[in-house]
C-alpha cells in the first residue's frame, strides 16, 4: 500500500471526498482516501439535514448519476418534507432531517464496502508535482503516496481559523486540527487564493427545552425519499420546532458587539450572504423585532439539538445568556457555543469544467476549496471530480454536464465562468432551464448518461426505461380517453371549474389549473381502474407534462439553441491579445478563463454579444 501507485488519491473525507472516492472506485479505479480522522468521515459539520430549495434537486441528481448521498440520506433520515408544494413543480424541493451520527456511520460502511477504496489516516501537507503534472501527495509523516490523479476536497481545513469572541485558534472544525502546507505550495505554483468564512450555531441539550412554547413542524404525512432505488420508506418521523428571538435576545447580543470578531475586523474572509450570523441579522435588519429559529434534533436517540438560525461568533457567555431569553429555551443547557471559521479557498475560474485545475494537470478541486457552501454542492462536485479523474486515468472522454441537463451543470458552469467572491449556494433562480431540471425527472435526464459511463447500474437503467414507457402509456391513454359531460360536470362545479357541454378528452380537463389527476380518478372509475396499474412516479410525470407542456417545449427549444453554441469548440489556446476588435475586458477574461466552447465564452461575466460575434468571425477564418 505504501509503495503502490493509485489511480486516484482523494484528500479529505467530507461530502465531496466521499462521493469522489466512491465514484472513481465504482468505475474501476484504485482509490486511496486520505483523511485526518477516520472517525469523522462524512461528518455533518453544520446542520443535520440534506436537501432544501435547489439543494434537494442536486441530491436527486447525484443519486440519478449513481452517487451515494441520496441512498445514505434515505437510510438515516428522521424527517422528510417536500418544500414549495404550493408552487409549480420546478420549485418542489425535497429536504430531509438526518440522524447525524448514523449518516456518518452509513457513509463509512458504504466506503468500506467498496473493494477498490483504501484508507489512510493522516494529514496531507503537500503535493508531488513533476513539471506541471500532479503525481501524488506527501503526508505529515513524510510518506509519499503516488497516483495518476489527485482530488483535493479539504473543506474548511486549509489554514482554518476558528473565532469565538476575542478568542481564536487554528482548527478545521470544532476539536479538529487545521491543515497547513497545501495552500502555500499551490500559491508558489501560480494559484490565486483567497479567504472565506462560515459559521455554526450553538448545540444545546434537548432535555432542557420546553417544546410546548414552540410551534411544531412535522414531516410530510406521506414522506417521499431521495433515491430512485428501493431504499427504506420513512415509517415514523421526529418533529422539528420553530421559535423566535425577541428584543431581549437582541439587546443581550448587542452587548457582545464590541468583542465580535466580525464587527471588529478580525475576520477577513467573506461569509455566506444567505446564511448570516444572528448578530449580523440584528445589525442589518434592525427594524425586525424577531427572527425565526428552527429547533432541529440531531438524531433518533441523542438529546443534542441544532439551533438553526442562531449562528454566532460572539463570546460564549453572550450566546448562552441570549439563548435563554428565547421562548422554550429559558432553562437551556449548552453543549458547545457557536463559532465562525475562516479558511482558504481557490477562485474556481482556475478550473476546467471537469474540475481539473488549469495550472497543474491531473489535479482536481471539489467542494469548499472552490468557494461553495453546503453538503449538497460539495457532494455533486466530488462526484464529478471523481468521475473525471477516472476518465483521465483511462484516457476517456471527460464527463461534463450542460446547464440544460442538470443543476450540477449550472453550478460548475457558474463557478468556472463567473467565479465567486462569497460562498456560492445553489438556488432555483440560478437555473434558466429550471422547468426542465425538476427533482422528479433527474433519473430520466441523467441515469442514461451515467449508465453509459458505467456508474449507474443496469437496475437503475431498467427502472428509468420502465418509468419512461409507463409515462408514455398514461399520456396516450389520457389523450384518447373520452369524457361525457354527465360524468364530470358535478366534480367540475365542485372545484370551481366551468362545466363542459360536449364530450371531450381527459387530457383537456387535466390542462385546467383547478384539476389534478387524482380529481379525474375520483370522478371517473374506468380511468381510475386503468391508472391504478401504473406507478406513482409515472402518473406524476404524465400530469406535469400535460400541465406544463408549452413551457417545457419552449425551454427545450432554448436549450437546443444554446446547445448549438456548446458544440462550437475552441481548440487549443487562442491569442486573444491579437484580436483588437475584442473589448479590453473580454481579452482579459478570455485569456484568464480560456473557454473551451463558444457557449462557455458567452457566459463569462463581462463578455458581450459583440465580443462573441468577433470571436465567431475569428474562428470562422
Image (cartoon, helix red, strand yellow):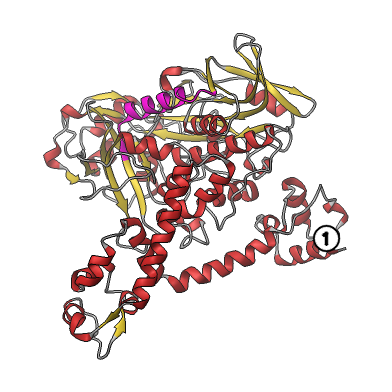
Give the x, y percent position of residue 355. 63, 40
Q: Residue furthest bottom?
A: 501
Q: Does the magenta stretch include residue 175?
A: no
Count the marks. Answer: 1
Image-quadrant location for residue 42 = top left
Give the x, y percent position of residue 51. 38, 44
Q: In this view, does 361 lie above or below 51?
A: above
Horizontal side of residue 573 vs 249, given as left or right: right
> Which residue is drawn at the image coordinates 74% and 23% (left, top)?
129
Image-quadrant location for residue 384 = top right
Region rendered in magenta: 97-116
Give the x, y percent position of residue 522. 19, 69
Q: How crowded is mark 1: few (under 14 residues within 10 Å), some or many (20 or more)?
A: some
Horizontal side of residue 101 vs 550, given as left or right: left
> Which residue is drawn at the image coordinates 21% and 79% (left, top)?
492
Residue labelled with disc 1: 619
Q: In this view, does 504 lie above or below 568?
A: below
Q: Residue furthest left?
A: 212
| Residue 471 visible to an observer of this rendering | yes
Q: Which residue lies furthest to the top in this view?
A: 141
Q: Is mark 1 on a helix, strand or loop?
A: helix
| Residue 520 visible to an observer of this rendering | no
Horizontal side of residue 299 vs 162, given as left or right: left
Horizontal side of residue 103 vs 460, given as left or right: left
In front of the other: 61 or 90:
61
Which corner quadrant holds the C terminus? Answer: bottom right
Q: Is the magenta stretch mostly helix, strand or loop?
A: helix
Give the x, y percent position of residue 482. 30, 81
Which corner quadrant holds the N terminus? Answer: top right
Amino acid at each position: 500500500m505504501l509503495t503502490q501507485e493509485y489511480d486516484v488519491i482523494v484528500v479529505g473525507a467530507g461530502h465531496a471526498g466521499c462521493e469522489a472516492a466512491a465514484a472513481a472506485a465504482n468505475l474501476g479505479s484504485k482509490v486511496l482516501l486520505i483523511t485526518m480522522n477516520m472517525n469523522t468521515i462524512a461528518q455533518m459539520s453544520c446542520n443535520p439535514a440534506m436537501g432544501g430549495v435547489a439543494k434537494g434537486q442536486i441530491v436527486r441528481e447525484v443519486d440519478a448519476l449513481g452517487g451515494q448521498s441520496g441512498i445514505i440520506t434515505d437510510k438515516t433520515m428522521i424527517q422528510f418534507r417536500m418544500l414549495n408544494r404550493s408552487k409549480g413543480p420546478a420549485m418542489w424541493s425535497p429536504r430531509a432531517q438526518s440522524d447525524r451520527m448514523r449518516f456518518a456511520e452509513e457513509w463509512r460502511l458504504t466506503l468500506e464496502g467498496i473493494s477498490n477504496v483504501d484508507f489512510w489516516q493522516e494529514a496531507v501537507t503537500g503535493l508531488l508535482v513533476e513539471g506541471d503534472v500532479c503525481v501524488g501527495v506527501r503526508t505529515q509523516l513524510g510518506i509519499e503516496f503516488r497516483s495518476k490523479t489527485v482530488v483535493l476536497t479539504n473543506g474548511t481545513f486549509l489554514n482554518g481559523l476558528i473565532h469565538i469572541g476575542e478568542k481564536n485558534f487554528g482548527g478545521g472544525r470544532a476539536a479538529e486540527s487545521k491543515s497547513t502546507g497545501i495552500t502555500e505550495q499551490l500559491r508558489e505554483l501560480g494559484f490565486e487564493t483567497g479567504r472565506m468564512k462560515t459559521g455554526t450555531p450553538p448545540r444545546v441539550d434537548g432535555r432542557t427545552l420546553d417544546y410546548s412554547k414552540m410551534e411544531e413542524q412535522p414531516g410530510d404525512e406521506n414522506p417521499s425519499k431521495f433515491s430512485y432505488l428501493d431504499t427504506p420508506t420513512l415509517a415514523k418521523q421526529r418533529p422539528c420546532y420553530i421559535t423566535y428571538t425577541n428584543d431581549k435576545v437582541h439587546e443581550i447580543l448587542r452587548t457582545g458587539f464590541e468583542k465580535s470578531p466580525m464587527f471588529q475586523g478580525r475576520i477577513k474572509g467573506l461569509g455566506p450572504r444567505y446564511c448570516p450570523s444572528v448578530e449580523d441579522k440584528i445589525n442589518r435588519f434592525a427594524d425586525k423585532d424577531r427572527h425565526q429559529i428552527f429547533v432541529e434534533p440531531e438524531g433518533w436517540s441523542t438529546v443534542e439539538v441544532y439551533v438553526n438560525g442562531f449562528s454566532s461568533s460572539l463570546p460564549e457567555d453572550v450566546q448562552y445568556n441570549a439563548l435563554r431569553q428565547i421562548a422554550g429555551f429559558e432553562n437551556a443547557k449548552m453543549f458547545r457555543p457557536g463559532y465562525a471559521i475562516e479558511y482558504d479557498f481557490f477562485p474556481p475560474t482556475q478550473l476546467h469544467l471537469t474540475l481539473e485545475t488549469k495550472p497543474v494537470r491531473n489535479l482536481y478541486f471539489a467542494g469548499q476549496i472552490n468557494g461553495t457552501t453546503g453538503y449538497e454542492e460539495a457532494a455533486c462536485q466530488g462526484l464529478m471530480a471523481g468521475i473525471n479523474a477516472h476518465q483521465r486515468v483511462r484516457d476517456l472522454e471527460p464527463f461534463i454536464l450542460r446547464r440544460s441537463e442538470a443543476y450540477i451543470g449550472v453550478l460548475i458552469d457558474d463557478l468556472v465562468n463567473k467565479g465567486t467572491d462569497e460562498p456560492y449556494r445553489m438556488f432555483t433562480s440560478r437555473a434558466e432551464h429550471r422547468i426542465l431540471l425538476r427533482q422528479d425527472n433527474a433519473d430520466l435526464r441523467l441515469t442514461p448518461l451515467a449508465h453509459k459511463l458505467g456508474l449507474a447500474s443496469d437496475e437503475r437503467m431498467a427502472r428509468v426505461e420502465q418509468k419512461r414507457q409507463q409515462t408514455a402509456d398514461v399520456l396516450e391513454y389520457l389523450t384518447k380517453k373520452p369524457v361525457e359531460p354527465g360524468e364530470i360536470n358535478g366534480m367540475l362545479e365542485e372545484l370551481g371549474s366551468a362545466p363542459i357541454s360536449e364530450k371531450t378528452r381527459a387530457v383537456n380537463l387535466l390542462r385546467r389549473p383547478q384539476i389534478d389527476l387524482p380529481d379525474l380518478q375520483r370522478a371517473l372509475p374506468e380511468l381510475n381502474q386503468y391508472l391504478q396499474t401504473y406507478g406513482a412516479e409515472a402518473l406524476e410525470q404524465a400530469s406535469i407534462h400535460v400541465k406544463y407542456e408549452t413551457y417545457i417545449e419552449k425551454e427545450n427549444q432554448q436549450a437546443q439553441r444554446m446547445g448549438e453554441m456548446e458544440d462550437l469548440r475552441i481548440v487549443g489556446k487562442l491569442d486573444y491579445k491579437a484580436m483588437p476588435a475584442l473589448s479590453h475586458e473580454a481579452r482579459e477574461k478570455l485569456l484568464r478563463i480560456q473557454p473551451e466552447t463558444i457557449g462557455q465564452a458567452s457566459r463569462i461575466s463581462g463578455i458581450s454579444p459583440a465580443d462573441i460575434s468577433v470571436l465567431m468571425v475569428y474562428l470562422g477564418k
